Amino acid sequence: MEKALLEPEGLAGKGVAKMKMMIGKILLALVAVSMLGGCATHSTPQNTAMLDAVIREPVNVAKYTTVTVMPFTLAEGVTIEKPKFAENFAIEIAARIRDDHPGVFRTVGWHKSKQKPDEVIVTGAIRGYKQGSSIARNILPGLGGTSFEGEMVIKDAVDGKVLLTASFDKLGLVGGIRERTIDHITAESAVAIAKTVALWKQGQLSR
């Protein structure tokens, strides 16, 4: 009789032990994330790498004094719930070119090209957008990851000839103090695109 009464308590003890083990694993993962460093930093040209660019058409970049950033298109199957995301992303890139690299272009605009011989257009396509889950990332790094990927192009404003292409692919896999949300990685992408455009204009990119 005593043995029968003790069995449920034994099963409950095993359940508690498993729960403690699971909680321990989660806490260990969170500690590992916190040890990666301090708070997430603001993206700047100094701490953000340029994109891996390919020059498609060698040209005399000195003749281009105007850059216009056009809204990126969404590839088939890509949906973004944020209204006017593509337009706002273009505005962010234009602002980064103007503010992070002052004087590289005489004129920086967005959305409306004047199709002049001294003008280049920066645009591209968004091929992947995943907001992910902040709650999942806080439970375990890698869960609920966020991602943003696509391709940027620089082209002549008159004949539309593609002068340069570059892919971007940003991930946010951790939560907590090192969390990189979709807003973080899209801002980082804008900084990287602006930096790449500026270096191209300055003749610092090789074929």
Image (spheres, rainbow, N blue to C red):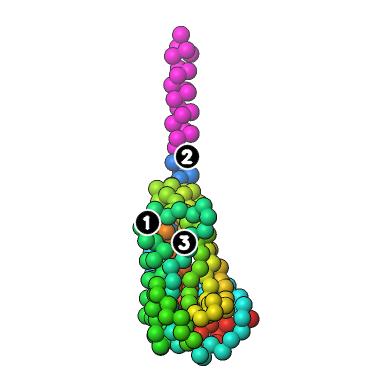
Mark number, residue 22: 2
* In-image side of 61 versus 87 (left or right): right
* In-image side of 165 versus 92 (left or right): right
- Rendering quarter of residue 113: bottom left
Q: Earlier in the sequence, mark 3 or mark 2?
A: 2
Estimate how packed mark 3 is, as few (under 14), some (14 to 19) or many (20 or more) residues with alpha carbons within 10 Å: few
**Residue 38 visible at all:** no
Camera-nearest residue between 55 and 148: 55
* Residue 130 to residue 165: above or below: above
Kind of element beneath mark 3: loop
Residue shown at the point (39%, 66%) measured from the top left: 87
Q: In the rendered structure, which segment of residues is drawn in magenta?
A: 1-21
Instruction: Check if residue 2 falls in the magenta segment.
Output: yes
Question: Pointers 3 and 2 in contact (CB under 8 A)?
Answer: no
- The kind of residue on which mark 3 rests is Leu
Residue 80 in percent (x, y) is at 42, 55
- How far is mark 1 from mark 3, CA to CA? 31 Å
Q: Earlier in the sequence, mark 1 or mark 3?
A: 3
Mark number, residue 200: none
Q: Which residue is mark 1?
A: 82
Residue 154 in percent (x, y) is at 52, 76
Q: Which residue is mark 3?
A: 36
